[in-house]
Amino acid sequence: MNNLFSDTKEAFSLKSNFELNRAFFLFKIIGNSTFVKLSTSLTNFALKFHLPVTPIIKATVFDHFCGGVSEEDCIPVINKMFIKNVYSVLDFSTEGFNSEKEFDDCLRKKTSIIEFAKNRKEIPFAVFKPTCLGSTDLFKKVSKFEKLNELENDSWNRVIQRFDKVCSKAFKQNIKILIDAEEVEVQNAIDELAIKMMRKYNLTSPIVYNTVQMYRKDRLSYLGEMISNQLNDGVIFGLKLVRGAYMEKERNLAVSMNVESPICDSKDDTDKNFNSGLDFVFNNLNRISFVCASHNENSILKVMNMMESKKLKSNDNKIWFGQLYGMSDNISFNLASKNYNTFKILPFGSVKNLMPYLIRRAEENTSVQGQTGRELQLILKERKRRALL
Ligand SMILES: Cc1cc2nc3c(=O)[nH]c(=O)nc-3n(C[C@H](O)[C@H](O)[C@H](O)COP(=O)(O)OP(=O)(O)OC[C@H]3O[C@@H](n4cnc5c(N)ncnc54)[C@H](O)[C@@H]3O)c2cc1C
C-alpha cells in the first residue's frame, strides 16, 4: 500500500541500525510458528527452574516490545518517542493476579502510575485490565447476574471500590483512564462498572474510557443502548474501539458449551462491524471521545477521512490513535508526524511477569500473511534505504 504509512524513514527514525537489524531478526524468527511453540515451552521451562535465560530475553524480545522493568526505566523511551510527537501509556504487567492481597497491590501500582503520569504531558492516559482488581470467577458470576453469597458480595464491593479508587485518582490528576476489554464471560460486569464510573467522572470531560471489541456480533446494539439509556444523559462517553484479542478462546468456549459463537464468523464481518462502529462514533461525536486502537491501516485511514469530512483538526482532542510498542511504527510515527494524537502502549514489569504478554505478541505475529509480513516488508525497505543489505 503506497500511502502515508509507507514512509519507513519516518517510521523507524528512532531505531538505530542495530535495533532495526534486531527487529528484522525477531520478526523473521517469530514468523515461524514451530519455532515459537518450541521456544515458548523452553523459555517457560527455563524460567520455572531459574535457568539464566533472563538476559537473553531482555536483550531481544523484551527490549523490542517493552519499556523496561520500572517506570524510571521507561523514561528514555518515553522521552525519545515524545520528540517525535508520540505519547506513551504505561502498562504494568498484571497477569495472573489471584488473591485479595495481589488485587490491592495492583490497585496501589495503578494509582502510583497515575501519580507518575501527573504533570507529564507525554503520558496522557493510564490503563488497567479489570480482572487485575478482582477475581475472574467473581466477574463471571456478576456478568451472568448470578446471586452472590455474603462473602462474594463483600469481595465484589471491594472490586467496585478499587475501580472507583483508580478512576477517582485519574479524575483528580486529570489523566484519562483506559479500561481494557476481556473475554465475553467477564465483560458484562466490566461494562457495568465502566458506565458507573463514566456517570461519576465523565460529566465535564472524558476521563474514563471503556473498550468495545467490534469482533463481537452484539456490540453495535450495545453501543446503541448505551447512548439511548436515559441514565447516561449528560455523560461524555470515552470509548476505545478494538477488533478483539480473544477470538480463538471465545470460539473454543462456544463449541465446548454448544452455543453460537459471540464472535463474527469471518475477518470480513469483523472489519465491517469495526467500520460500523466507527460510523457510530462519528455520528455521535457530540457525546463521544474516541480512541482508535488498531494496527489496521485501512481503519486508521477511514478515521482520518472521517475527521477530514467533519472538518476536524488532526489533533482534535476528541480523537486518539493507539498502537502497541514494538509494532506498527509505520502507523504511529507517520500519524504523529502529521500531528494526529497518537500513543504507544508501553508495557513494563519483570521479564517473568511479561512472558505471557510477549508470548501473545509472538503468537499473533506468526502469520507471515498478517502483521509479521507487513513488519518485515517495512523493515526490509528501510534496511535497503539505509543500505544495510
Ligand atoms: C492500543 C491497543 C489496545 C488494545 N486493547 C485491547 C483490549 O483492551 N482488549 C482486546 O480484546 N484487545 C485489545 N487490543 C488488541 C486488538 O483487539 C486486536 O487484537 C489487535 O489490535 C489486532 O487487530 P487490528 O485492528 O490491529 O488489525 P487486523 O490485523 O486488521 O485485525 C486482526 C483482528 O481481526 C479479528 N479477526 C481476525 N481473523 C478473524 C476471523 N477469521 N473472524 C473474525 N474476526 C477475525 C481479530 O479480532 C483479530 O485480532 C488492543 C490493541 C491495541 C493496538
Image: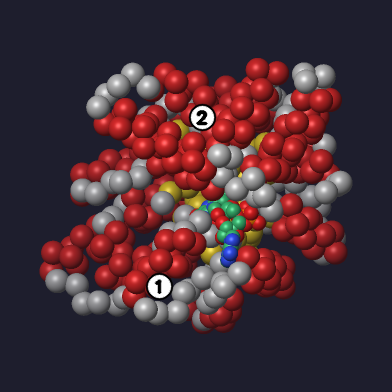
Residue 307 seen in the figure? no
Where's the C terminus, which quadrant?
top right
Rendering coords of residue 106 (x, y %): 32, 43
- Tell me which amino acid carries mark 2: Val
Q: Residue at x 64, y 45 (%)?
A: 368
**Is residue 10 left or right of 43 when viewed as pictured?**
right
Residue holding disc 2: 61
Observer-nearest of 342 and 333 = 333
Q: SS of the residue at dot 2?
A: helix
Q: Is residue 204 above or below residue 61?
A: below
Q: Residue at x 57, y 44 (%)?
A: 365
Q: Is residue 24 above or below residue 308?
A: above
Rendering coords of residue 203 (x, y %): 54, 64
**Residue 323 location, quadrant:** top right
Residue 61 seen in the figure? yes
The crowd level at tag 2 (other Cα within 10 Å; few <14, some 14-19, many 20+) is many
Give the numbered dot on residue 254.
Answer: 1
Q: How is the image coloured?
A: secondary structure
- Whether ligand 1 has any atom under 8 Å from the Cβ at mark 2 is answered as no
**Residue 56 location, quadrant:** top left
**Is residue 299 left or right of 232 when viewed as pictured?**
right
The crowd level at tag 1 (other Cα within 10 Å; few <14, some 14-19, many 20+) is some
Rendering coords of residue 142 (x, y %): 29, 71
